Image (spheres, rainbow, N blue to C red):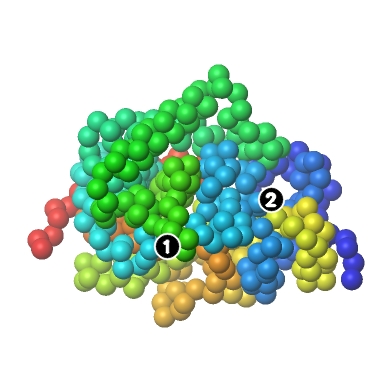
């Protein structure tokens, strides 16, 4: 066996970072054409990212010994400064397993239906405020919907002064934190919050203060409640231990970012794809009018295939790992590519085309369709996110006559996510009356 890394470009690491931020998908497409299903990208300071799009190798990575391939360590460089050390996304081993077990009951699929009324009310309120007859960006409205859903269902905050104070600080913090060029210091392993005089650092501290105040307030109240925070505070591990305030804070911020920003961006992409394909939009309107959701699920799956929010998943190689014909030394990172796996012509004929029909009667292959990750590290909020996206589309699509204002969006960076340029600019031509119950 050879210890050589898979082939890849010789571009210096810092230049690859800059291109990765500015042109992530063209970069992946080019390297895939040049080097095939497995290739290496250099990282500053040593090591490499080994990008994988072969389904069998992705399966092997997802099922590998978690002590050999560390998902938490693979995410920590980028995510830990914001999420903390006790986030599901930055933990590994027994700590990750304990935290996941504590959180799972709050995200059981059946519980999602308890949140349906809140999700519909928030969507209806937002939809009523969309301007008619003039161009506007959908993405901010989707962000507002998903943020309010999180604050109500996860944080347990109804409208009020406490809700507004935390909401305003979160919006400002996230707006700054989503600057894609903050990825440069993060990838160089420089904490962007290390300088106390920076606005982003002050905002993060203010948000943390609000969250810790909320946790303390909720701990003083009688146990109970249907929101996720109540379940987190009541949860106990096998030794009878509750989550600490720091653990609760880190998971709340994780759920906020994973359940707010990514879901909003997926919704913005869904409307972009629907309106770029008017026949698909009309078919979805007809299906929803008849109370059928099968085509809606197909639309969502196809959108997440062609426009994934995150292009790759990270795994830190803690011990030498056999990847196909390569023995990957410790210290490198494996990166199954959500984007490239979804562009495989052998799995998806005519992969560049938006064809929801390809999903009718077909279950996703977990190694070519992986917008929520895979294996034991699959996103704990997958059911929540999909349920919320269905609710938003069920509420808006049957009543909205609209079109794209500037044509289909292109891919632009928003922090670690890939968002539609211009936020999916649309014109709402007509807001139809709500059908009678």
Which mark, residue 104? 1
Specify whether residue 183 is in view: yes
Q: Residue furthest right?
A: 2
Mark 2 burial class by Cα count in 10 Å: few <14, some 14-19, many 20+: some
Of the pair 416 and 196, the residue shown nearer to us: 196
Farthest-out residue, top: 197
Tell me residue 171's x, y (percent). Answer: 39, 34
Q: Which residue is mark 2?
A: 27
Q: Quadrant of residue 84?
A: top right
Q: Nearer the viewer, residue 341 or 108?
A: 108
Q: Residue furthest left?
A: 436
Q: Secondary structure at mark 2?
A: helix
At x 40% / y 36%, what residue is drawn?
212
Residue at 67%, 69% (x, y): give it.
Answer: 64
Name the quadrant containing residue 33.
Answer: bottom right
Q: Residue at 68% across / 68% down in the picture? A: 65
């Amino acid at each position: 066996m050879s210890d050589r890394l898979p082939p890849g470009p010789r571009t210096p690491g810092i230049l690859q970072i800059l291109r990765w931020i500015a042109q992530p998908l063209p970069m992946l497409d080019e390297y895939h054409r040049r080097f095939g299903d497995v290739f290496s990208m250099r990282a500053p300071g040593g090591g490499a990212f080994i990008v994988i799009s072969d389904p069998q190798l992705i399966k092997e990575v997802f099922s590998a010994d978690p002590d050999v391939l560390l998902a938490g360590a693979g995410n920590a460089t980028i995510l830990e400064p914001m999420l903390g050390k006790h986030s599901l996304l930055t933990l590994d081993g027994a700590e990750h397993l304990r935290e996941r077990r504590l959180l799972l009951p709050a995200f059981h699929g059946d519980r999602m239906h308890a949140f349906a009324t809140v999700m519909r009310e928030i969507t209806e309120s937002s939809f009523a405020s969309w301007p008619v007859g003039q161009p506007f960006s959908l993405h901010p409205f989707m962000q507002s919907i998903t943020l309010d859903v999180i604050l109500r269902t996860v944080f347990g905050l109804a409208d009020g002064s406490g809700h507004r104070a935390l909401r305003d600080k979160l919006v400002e913090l996230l707006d700054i934190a989503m600057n894609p060029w903050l990825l440069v210091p993060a990838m160089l392993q420089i904490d962007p919050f290390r300088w106390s005089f920076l606005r982003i650092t002050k905002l993060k501290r203010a948000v943390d203060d609000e969250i810790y105040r909320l946790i303390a307030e909720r701990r003083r109240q009688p146990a109970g409640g249907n929101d996720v925070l109540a379940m987190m505070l009541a949860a106990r591990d096998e030794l009878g231990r509750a989550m600490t305030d720091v653990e609760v804070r880190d998971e709340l911020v994780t759920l906020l970012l994973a359940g707010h920003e990514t879901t909003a961006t997926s919704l913005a992409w869904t409307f972009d794809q629907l309106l770029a394909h008017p026949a698909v939009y009309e078919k979805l309107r007809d299906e929803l009018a008849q109370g059928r959701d099968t085509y809606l699920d197909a639309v969502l799956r196809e959108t997440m295939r062609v426009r994934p929010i995150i292009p790759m998943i990270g795994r830190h190689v803690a011990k030498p790992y056999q990847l196909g014909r390569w023995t990957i030394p410790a210290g490198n990172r494996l990166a199954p590519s959500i984007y490239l796996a979804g562009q495989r012509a052998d799995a998806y004929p005519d992969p560049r085309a938006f064809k929801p029909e390809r999903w009718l009667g077909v279950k996703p292959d977990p190694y070519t369709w992986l917008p929520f990750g895979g294996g034991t590290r699959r996103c704990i909020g997958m059911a929540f996110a999909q349920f919320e996206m269905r609710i938003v589309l069920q509420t808006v699509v049957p009543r909205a006559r609209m079109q794209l204002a500037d044509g289909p969006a292109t891919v632009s960076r928003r922090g670690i996510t890939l968002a539609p340029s211009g936020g999916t600019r649309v014109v709402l031509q007509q807001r139809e009356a709500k059908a009678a119950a």
